[in-house]
Amino acid sequence: MGLKNTSPSSTQSWADYYTTQAKHCQDPTLQRFYATGLVSPDTPIGEVPLMALDFETTGMNAAKHDIVSIGMVPFTLQRIRPAQGHYWVVKPRRSLREESIVHHRITHSEIEHAPDLETVLDEVLDRLAGHLVVVHYRNIERNFLDGAIFARRGEHCLFPVIDTMVIEARFERGQRFQTLKRLFGIAPPSIRLAASRERYGLPPYSTHHAKVDALATAELLQAQIARHYSPQTPVSELWA
């Protein structure tokens, strides 16, 4: 089994955590993932290899629901590479719910012959290794992947992420006038992926396809950095 702690302590950096995990993980793929290392916190975001990651799941609770599809797209602030991205449909270990089928449109027949996540897990981790992961709502991608790996390999897998939803909340819900709006009963602006993209003039995409949503997340981060930050912003200001 791997380490009992699942994330860096308050006195431990992500770099130290990676070093510790690389030494103590028993699974070769996790060893390789952590041994690849992580960019320094003071690295400018414009110099970092990024990987947009998105899951479609059978529900929102990682303890009760499962991953049904995975999409990832590598990118930098200068270029997005969808042709180098990947998409997998995987068979959940729990039954599909009708609500989730309506949401992501992946049906029983589509997953009937799909592989278990275990079959593609090594490839997923190898493709993530060396990249700073970008998601829209980290409680899905980070929690579901960690839970799925623990269920199959008996070890945890955690890493820092840039969460475009958190960035959007910071600027759309953290301003003083938003507090005043709430006092007068005015609903806060949506920070869902589609609504967030609309604020930056990004085109609408069909939602709830894991690779398309990964691409949409990559474009959103590029727009957020251009408007609110700069390519010189250290990643420590952006990751969680």
Image (spheres, grey):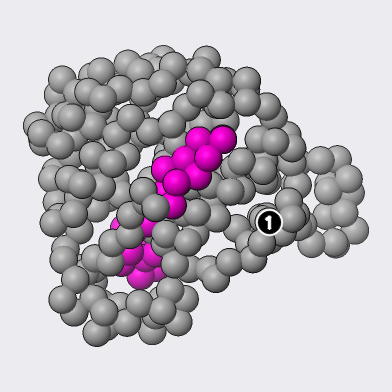
- Residue located beneath label 1 in the image: 202
**Quarter occupied by residue 114:** bottom left
Please give the range of residues in magenta.
56-82
Q: Which amino acid type is marked by label 1?
A: Leu
| Residue 126 percent across, percent down from the top left | 23, 39
Residue in view at x 67 percent, y 43 percent = 223
Please provide percent x and percent y for residue 196.
68, 55
Residue at 81% across / 40% down in the picture? 175
* Residue 56 drawn above or below residue 219: below
Please say whether residue 239 is one of the residues in the magenta stretch.
no
Residue at left offset 42%, top offset 59%: 211
Residue 79 forms part of the magenta stretch: yes
Q: Nearer the viewer, residue 86 or 97?
A: 86
Task: Tell me if residue 220 can be seen.
Answer: yes
Within 10 Å of disc 1 (Cα), the crowding (few <14, some 14-19, many 20+) is some
Residue 32 sits above or below residue 10 on the image? below
Q: Which image quadrant: the N terminus?
A: top left
Q: Position of residue 229 (x, y in %)?
A: 69, 29
